[in-house]
Amino acid sequence: MTLDALLQRTDVWRGGRLTAAVKAVPSGFTELDELLGGGWPQGALTEIIMPRQGIGALRLLIPALARLSQGDRWICWVAPPHIPYAPALVNAGVDLSRILLVHPRAQQDGLWAVEQSLRSGNCAAVLAWPALDDKVILRRLQLAAEAGGALGVLFRPRHFVQRPSAAALRIQLASGIDGGLSVSVLKRRGGWVAGPVHLDNSLQTHGALALHSRGTTATGNFRSQWQ
Amino acid sequence: MLLCNEVAQIRGICPGMPVAAARALARDLIIQSRDHKAEQAALHSLAAWAYQFSSQVSLYPPCALLLEVQGSLTLFGGRVALLKKLRAGLAELGYQVQFAGAPTPLAALSLVRCQREQMVEEQHQLAAALAPLPISVLDWEQTLLDRMDGMGVRRLGDVLRLPRDGLARRLGQRSLLYLDRMLGRQPDPQTLYRPPTQFKHRLQLPSEVEHAQVLLFALQRLVLELCGWLQGLGAGVQTFDIALWHRQGRQTSLCIGIHKGSRDAEQFTILLRERLERLVLQEPVISVELCAEKIVKLEAQSLDLFGKTDVRGEVDLLDRLRARLGDQAVKGVSAVAEHRPEYAWCYSEPGHSQKDSSGQQRPLWLLPVPRQLKTRSGRPQLQGELKLQPGCERIESGWWDEQDVARDYFVATNSFGSCYWIYRELSGERHWYLQGVFE
């Protein structure tokens, strides 16, 4: 086993990390992984609060989805606001055969589908865009994500910032300079509010980042720890 | 009267009573006439179910089934364990059953006909076990039985005590063969039941049902029969159909899919419940029917004797979502080798995707229908003025199917940092359109 492969393992505890207990999916962005303590928390609910569409919220998640799609579990999209465009997903290295699109007719069905998908254990990640504001439901979704070991991601408009939430991780996005993205952590387990960090996930550099994320993330972290 | 329930018994009604007499005792008596056809169908469906316990099942109408179990004892962990499983399964199906066992088919049938729950293990015990039974258990002609009664022969023990040659002379050679078969002195080959290659069972409901959820109880019984049948065949199904029959031959059809193939009754019931919860019945249901036409081979190692996998009752996510939301609500996506962006993708069956992509930069969101953009002094607007990024991609294609496009595509951003994929038509009014979002 190479050192890289060893460091990729989620059960390897590394000094200087925030929480080693939480399973994390490397996000593909070194700065973000450092901020989140290894990456996106698996078996937990993450809320991404974004001021408007088109600033690259989904792009932030794509390297992790590409990595998860190499496994044998579904990446489930419940009621996406537009059509997830297959050619773009292929370009980003996402294996389309793991994509599951769910289009429920009613909002209640949508939340049911999110909960079932999170809980089933058949999904590596579940993405949803719920407009509903309900503390109890968020709590249920968080528990379902824990039960099923899924990365649950809710994309929420800006006015949800002030609302209490049971999600394990809440981050807020803002569009940064030069098409980049600034990320602040509003809530996380075992840590303080942090950020913002500025990520360059602009279109020009993003393609390259996604393609090399598997190799470079680990070495990047490795250097920052030992230099 | 053939059978009556407890309430009727309290009023003094008992089996064997003429209908008129029973009516005199209880004027509000509800009498259901015996349906021989339904009884026969029930016996057949029970045979199909019982086939999982023995490959040698024989029908003895109107109401007996014969199973050769010697060969199954080791598999099911002995006589007691097998009987327990049979009893539990039949109770779940809603039948009242009597068991009797013996080394020969005729002896077992005789015992069960006199409702003796008795197990005779050895052949030499047979004569003693059968001796107290009345001769009416022999399915011989009535005249013969009457003649024997006249001779003072009332019990099987009396018959067996008679000398053989005299018996042959008085009762005929056939009767002698019958007794020899019963005692195991002669082989008794059986006509074996062959399970059908398709499953189609219908269940008449005792009363009209108006709420879909109530149907689950009746359907569960059919599901158990289905799973028993599948167990006997060593197979599973990927789909089965439910027909809810209304009056005048109208029906509502449902299809349940299990894409991996299964014969787990618990799993089927969960999927059925999801489907029925969403169903609003237009009219009452009088009978339910379950059909399974195509069976699939299941991998044997993952199933134990009762067709359940290790993850018992666990329903695949895909099946569960489809059962509740409908087949059309759950899809996969494919990328298609095609220049026109709106045709460069399609929905596909989850897990089966094509991945042809040109490798060109594309947005993660595509709008179902391109949206025309407002312009101000010739420049496209979307929450402010859109700034076009350098570089333009010209797409001209599709002349062969009259859906041709001729467009210049741009990546554009507004002052809030939102990034869009827009195009301008190269002909006609040269309008600007929004087709994608670089989310």
Image (spheres, rainbow, N blue to C red):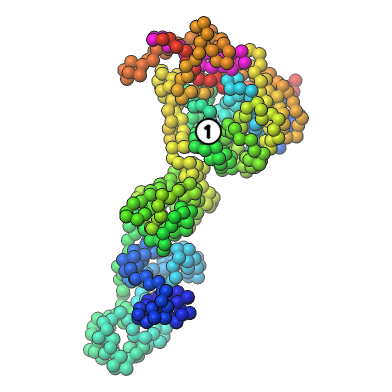
Near mark 1 (Cα within 10 A), the count class, few <14, some 14-19 or many ≥20, is many
Query: Where the N terminus of chain B falls, by quadrant?
Result: bottom left
Where is residue B9? Give x, y as percent. 46, 79
Residue at 49 percent across and 35 percent down: it is A103
Residue at 32 percent across and 78 percent down: it is B181
Residue A73: say if magenta: no
Residue at 41 percent across and 49 percent down: it is B282
Residue B342 against residue B249 in the figure, above or below: above
Residue A144 lies in what quarter of the image?
top right
Where is residue B391? Give x, y as percent. 51, 8
The one nearer the camera, B213 or A27, is B213
The one nearer the camera, B128 or A37, is A37
Where is residue A210? Give x, y as percent. 57, 22
Where is residue B357? Give x, y as percent. 45, 22
Residue B438 lies in what quarter of the image?
top right
User: The residue marked by circle 1 belongs to what chain?
Assistant: A
Q: Residue furthest front?
A: B27
Q: Secondary structure at mark 1?
A: loop
Residue A49 is at least partly visible in this image: yes
The residue indicated by pointer 1 is A79
Residue span colored magenta: B411-428
Is B401 positioned to the left or the right of B391 in the image?
left
Query: Where the C terminus of chain B falls, by quadrant?
Result: top right
The one nearer the camera, B233 or B422, is B422
